[in-house]
Image (cartoon, helix red, strand yellow):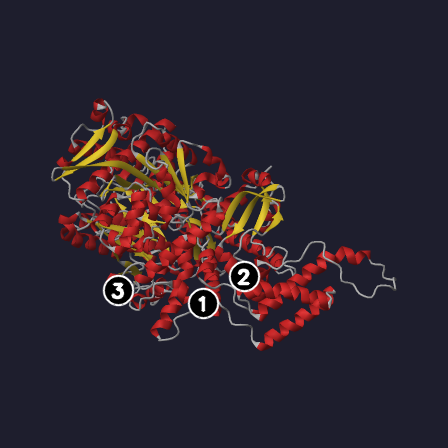
Amino acid sequence: MANPFEKRATEYLRDDEAFLTVVSPEPLSTFFEKQAREDKLFDRLVMIIGTPGSGKTTMARLFQYPTIRTLLRNESLESHRPLIASLSECGAIADGHPSLIGARIPLESEYREFWEFPYSDDLKLGLMTALIQARAVLGWINDLRDAGYEMSDIKFVPRGNADAASDAIGGARTEDIRAKAAEIELAIYNVSAALVPPEVESIPSAAATAYRPFDVIEQITVKRDNTVLALRPLIILDDAHTLHQTQFDLMRRWLARRELRVGRWVITRFDALTPRQVLLSPGLSGDREITYIRMQGDSGRAGERTAFRKMAKDISSRYLRRMDTFSRRGLTDLRSMLATNSDPLPAGKLEQLRKHVDSVQRRTGVSAARRRELEGLVAKYWSKNGGNPDLQLASLEILMERYQRRTRSRAGELDIFDDGITSFDPEPSKPISMDAGVADGARVHLLHSYDRPYYSGIDALCDAGSENAEQFLLLASVLVGQLETKLIRGRDLTLTTKEQDRLLRERATDLVRDWDFPHARKVRTLVDGIAEQCLRKSLEPNAPLKGGAIAFGILQSEFEALPSSHPELAQVLQFAVAYNAIGLVQDYGTKNQKWCLVELGGALLLKHGLTLSRGGFLERSVDDLAELLGGEPDAA
Amino acid sequence: MIWPNCSAVSQMQPEYRWDLAVTNRKENSRKFISEYFNDAERQVLLIAGAGFDPRATILAEQLGSLEFLQLRAAFIKETRSESDARLQQLASENLATLAEAIPNHEILAVDIFGADNSVTAGRSAARALHKFGLGDATDVIVDISALSVGVSFPMIRWVLDTAIASDNGLNVHIFVSHEPELDSRIRSVPAETPVAVHGFDGGMSLSAQGPKAARLWMPQLATGRTGALRRIHDKVTPDEVCVILPFPAAQTRHGDSLLEELLEPDDVPWDMDSRSIVYADEADPLDLYRTIMRLHALREPVFAETGGSQLILSPVGSKVMALGALLAALELDLPVIYLEDFSYELLDDGDSVGPAPDLMHVWLEGDPYTSNRPSVKRKAAL
């Protein structure tokens, strides 16, 4: 494999054994274990929501029966033990055996097309749900047959007294159940594949008859060597965002019924929910009949970031193990190969910076004594945080600028004709302090004014991934590629901060340039516009937003009206969210108000040289967003 | 070939249904049009695209100028939510030209996307044509010059199925104005999700087929389509890939350029070597058609015992080569997977049409053929 980071290897590794060597178990503990402990994974509808590349399908694959079997067949492998442990915690494995049989059905365009038929909603839904159930039954049987079980070893156990219902799904024998499912599938396929759908009266009876195995099947048992294993059937419906909105809602309602005994998971992207609901997702979370797992969410963000860092580091180790160049040398920790300490600025630039800071002192009217005090704060902070003279000078500049702003009103009170004034060194209206926010601001200023590297180290790489595995890997790939080149040439086994900064920013710029999805051009215009304004704010000399701004903040109430007030903008935002150009942080409380933050994705932060720290935003309106697109007439 | 002696053709036993199909090119096509169609006995229905493509009006104008022909037309207006104003203007002008050339016409609006950006092109097109009907036509012409794959393929399939089912000697012709240079100037933004062209699922989605067939994916390479091909590959998950390159081609090195574009900057997500390339004549659809049929015939016995073989086509490039893929897909009921075009861009303001495009004609069904040709396969019973 040339460079598995270039594209998510999991998508190319059709072989389960190869797949299991690269998949990280971290998302299982982050997203699934809690729900499993609360017994909310298999007895009700589970909706798994995330942007493209967030790992939804990868995680779901772990619950598929063939994957679990392969994992258990190789349980002695050290690398598999964390996965087995996590899956056991999640209830997929018990006593070294699979405890469920998961089958995945991608809800491809074929299902969406049911909604184009000239039939009643009931009939359309009936056709679709019957097809899903037929394919579920076929999927379970196929997986068990592939595992070596004969038809006679497999038994579908109906719930309660459901003999009559068993007859409706083919009977008691698995061969008959399979034949019935195949008959239903072909009949419905013939309707959906027809160039022109048949008249209602001409729909084959096999397609139109009620077929409800999910109401009937309680369990599937398999027998081998006089041992009977009971498996809970689980169906995983992937890519549900392709469905029509009404279709999606009706399907969700069907699957949410607690009478259904099979486990049912629905995987969808944010943009499944139409522009309105993409942007207004918190409302869904209140439904107790449904378990929601958001693989990129808008709550507990600090925790999400920490969890993602852990997962990303684990993924990178697994991928490095697949690269001979690294694994032969035992190099599987990417962190150790990414330097974080920058060299100080060259003497010439440092001198330039010193002179600049002196001129700031003169302009801001900071007295010598005040400067010494501020320098003391700066030195104290950086002595604990390993800062070079350049960082200290840049921090001092920010503090002096803040001092000026916080003493401005005092300056206004002065009587300039008062001969008694010999010195002016007022106390600031608010104490000046040196903290991580100022330090971040200093770094951003130095990045833009003196090309001092900003983006370096594994944590920065993880954060630039915006909690999206695919984005993380695409960014990491360029660093790994460079490391590989160095290794082959026998050079240093680390990338300097300068190299990392350059490579990441170039890579991010290429990624944004190569966006190729509907409305990509408009999305680019929109996010570049947001970024430019954020950068202007970030480079203000007093670093008012610490590291700077990375988002537009729009009043939540105004944002909720956006889909009807600005429908074209809503469409563009829908795709921007779906492709990680932006993230939406809703109901963000600050300044005694609720905001929706339209936050730039990691690739854009890198491209424009913005901070990776969160929280800084510019107060804006929906009209401001629309203006970036060239203005959009008010839909009203 | 122009217009063969029908009895001569009918005595030949082709290996494939369209192996000996009557085809015409360039001057022969024009001669065929002026001789064959200029006949008062013929009632011709032309189905053509009314889009921005400068080639949209070429055939209609020729037919419209014939003295004796009874001619009516269905002009297909493909509607996309994202549309460039300049291209809309060009489309309007083309529609006006078409309307003037063939006054007896109807405009069929086909929504390419639903309100939720789902692909509805093929289903809309088939429904619109079904509703329009073929009337008393003796000859149906489908001009695919200005029609997208998602619209033209289902329409041709519908016409073909209707012709075969009615068994009344309906003649079915396909025309395409071939100009590779113009093709490369039309750039598209692809939709998100690869889908099967409507009517061309080929049973891919059926679960009950037993062991999985060995999948060979045959994408046609085209300029600016590398990203789209990668996405289609991710959906198809083939066991093997065999790319189709144009050779011979108007630009001799065009195939090389396409390969360079595919292989750069990142590696392709499949194993690629010189054995995984098929060369097909850029200007002869039957060349690619025969190649696909041969490949299919070779693979069938090899994989018969292990689930069978499945060829999957993705004709994203020139329309002439797409036509070759269409013929194979029609005959073998092969899946055709593509990415619908979300929007278009016409690069450069240069001459809208350069030297006269090569007008290609394929006679699909009708007078030249007997009923004992190989039949078309269908999985759907309806």
Residue ID for mark 3: B273
User: Left or right: where does residue A186 sit relative to residue A357?
Assistant: left
> Considering the numbered disc 1 on the image, is that residue within a helix, a strand or a loop?
loop
Q: Chain of mark 3?
A: B
Name the residue furthest bottom. Answer: A348
Residue A213's place in the image compared with A354, above or below, is: above
Q: Amino acid at mark 3?
A: Asp
Q: Amino acid at mark 1?
A: Ala
Seen at 38% across and 66% down, the residue is: A481
Seen at 21% across and 23% down, the residue is: A163
User: Left or right: where does residue A386 sit relative to residue B260?
Assistant: right
User: Where is the C terminus of chain A found, in terms of image quarters?
Assistant: top right
Seen at 54% across and 68% down, the residue is: A452
Residue A432 percent location from the top left of the image: 66, 58
Q: Quadrant of residue A348?
A: bottom right
Q: Which mark is residue A339?
A: 1
Q: Which mark is residue A609?
A: 2
